[in-house]
């Protein structure tokens, strides 16, 4: 028998699926007293979906694991690991070349000042994101992503106090650093450090554009079939998972199973990135300002989200883990509203 609370969770998901903005949703939530998995519309609990930039948590976990094994330090210069041909001309700001000064910490915290190869405008005046949404699905390599970055202007000198700029290039570089240190592919690192130890059964790096396993994304009311782009992202946004697997992952991330728990407070150095989000070191803070949360009922969350409408967050105050997706590129905010509704219901 379903409890009243479980029924109310399901009602929240059912109401979100309107076949205009949201065609399917899948969420899971865990508190001290309950674990619940639910889906609605064209998604099921065990249906794999693109987690997009929530992938960055996998990259962060691997970097922190390597740190715990003394294979890197967050203050290491990336020039220790990145080929000179890649680094040359990467960060020239106001006539000064900062490329050699970039550190792993700068990349993780989006304080490198590097532009975003994906959402930043290219030489044709369009972003890669615009091109893909308009139907121009395309492949790119790590080298092409970095070349594209080099053609855009950096926004500030690395580590400028109080400044952060969200850039997928940062995590492309982190993926390359992981591969250089381990001498294994990013995909193999995910398997070895995360997927196999946690027993995740439907989580993997999307690399084959003919793979039809993950649910197709939506942009507004249309299916957004972009397998070439999704196979190109890698360490900045290429993972596929399910809400069941992601719940295991997010709990492991914040409870010391993937790297030492003592690292978590260190990651919480917040800079404004996009309202109401703040960027920490490899994680984001989602905290509603008081005027949207006058009673303070909505707790703050730490974790990450993706442009696909996927997210994975943890509320330290309430010890709630929430993961899921609304699988909608045009309205990723709906995922956050869903997370808030489920969390408030869970707290009642």
Image: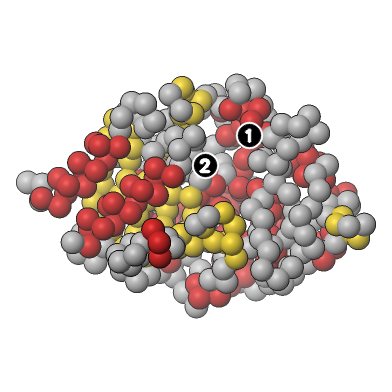
Q: Would you say the residues marked 2 and 1 are in contact, meaning their CB atoms lie under 8 Å apart?
A: yes
Quarter of the picture containing the C terminus is bottom left
Q: The residue tagged with tag 1: helix, strand or loop?
A: helix
**The quadrant where residue 61 appears:** bottom right
Sort mark 2 into few (<14), some (14-19) or many (20+) by Cα contacts within 10 Å.
some
Q: Position of residue 67 (x, y in %)?
A: 62, 70
Q: The residue tagged with tag 2: helix, strand or loop?
A: loop
Q: Is residue 121 above or below residue 31?
A: above
Colouring style: secondary structure
Q: Residue furthest left?
A: 1
Mark carried by residue 129: 1
Question: Residue 113 or 137: which is nearer the viewer?
Answer: 113
Mark 1 or mark 2, which is nearer the start of the sequence? Answer: 1
Image point (23%, 51%), residue name: 36
Q: Is residue 285 above or below residue 1?
A: below
Image point (14%, 45%), residue name: 7
98 horizontally vs 321: left or right = right
Q: Position of residue 258 (x, y in %)?
A: 48, 65
300 horizontally vs 91: left or right = left
Which residue has dot 2 on it?
Answer: 307
Does residue 115 appear anywhere in the picture? yes
Does residue 281 appear anywhere in the picture? no
Sort mark 1 into few (<14), some (14-19) or many (20+) by Cα contacts within 10 Å.
some
Q: Position of residue 327 (x, y in %)?
A: 42, 36
Image point (83%, 55%), residue name: 91
């Amino acid at each position: 028998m379903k409890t009243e609370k479980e029924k109310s969770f399901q009602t929240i998901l059912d109401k979100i699926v309107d076949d205009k903005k949201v065609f399917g949703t899948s969420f899971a939530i865990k508190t001290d007293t309950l674990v619940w998995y639910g889906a609605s519309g064209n998604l099921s609990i065990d249906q794999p979906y693109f987690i997009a930039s929530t992938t960055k948590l996998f990259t962060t976990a691997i970097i922190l694991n390597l740190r715990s094994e003394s294979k890197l330090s967050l203050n290491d210069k990336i020039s220790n690991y990145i080929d000179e041909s890649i680094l040359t001309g990467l960060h020239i700001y106001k006539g000064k070349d900062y490329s050699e000064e970039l550190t792993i910490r700068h990349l993780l915290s989006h304080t490198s000042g590097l532009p975003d190869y994906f959402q930043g405008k290219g030489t044709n005046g369009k972003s890669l994101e615009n091109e893909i949404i308009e139907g121009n699905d395309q492949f790119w390599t790590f080298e092409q992503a970095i070349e594209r970055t080099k053609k855009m202007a950096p926004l500030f000198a690395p580590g400028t106090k109080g400044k952060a700029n969200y850039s997928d290039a940062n995590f492309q570089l982190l993926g390359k650093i992981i591969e250089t240190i381990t001498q294994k592919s990013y995909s193999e690192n995910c398997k070895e450090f995360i997927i196999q130890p946690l027993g995740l059964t439907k989580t993997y790096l999307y690399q084959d554009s003919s793979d039809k396993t993950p649910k197709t994304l939506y942009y507004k009311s249309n299916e957004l079939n972009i397998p070439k782009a999704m196979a190109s992202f890698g360490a900045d946004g290429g993972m596929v998972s399910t809400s069941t697997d992601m719940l295991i992952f997010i709990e492991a991330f914040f409870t010391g199973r993937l790297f030492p728990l003592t690292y978590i407070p260190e990651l919480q150095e917040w800079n404004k990135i996009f309202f109401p989000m703040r960027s920490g070191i490899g994680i984001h803070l989602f905290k509603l300002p008081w005027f949207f949360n006058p009673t303070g009922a909505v707790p703050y969350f730490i974790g990450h989200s993706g442009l696909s409408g996927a997210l994975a967050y943890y509320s330290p105050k309430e010890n709630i883990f929430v993961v899921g997706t609304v699988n909608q590129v045009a309205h990723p905010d709906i995922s956050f509203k869903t997370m808030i509704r489920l969390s408030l219901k869970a707290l009642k």
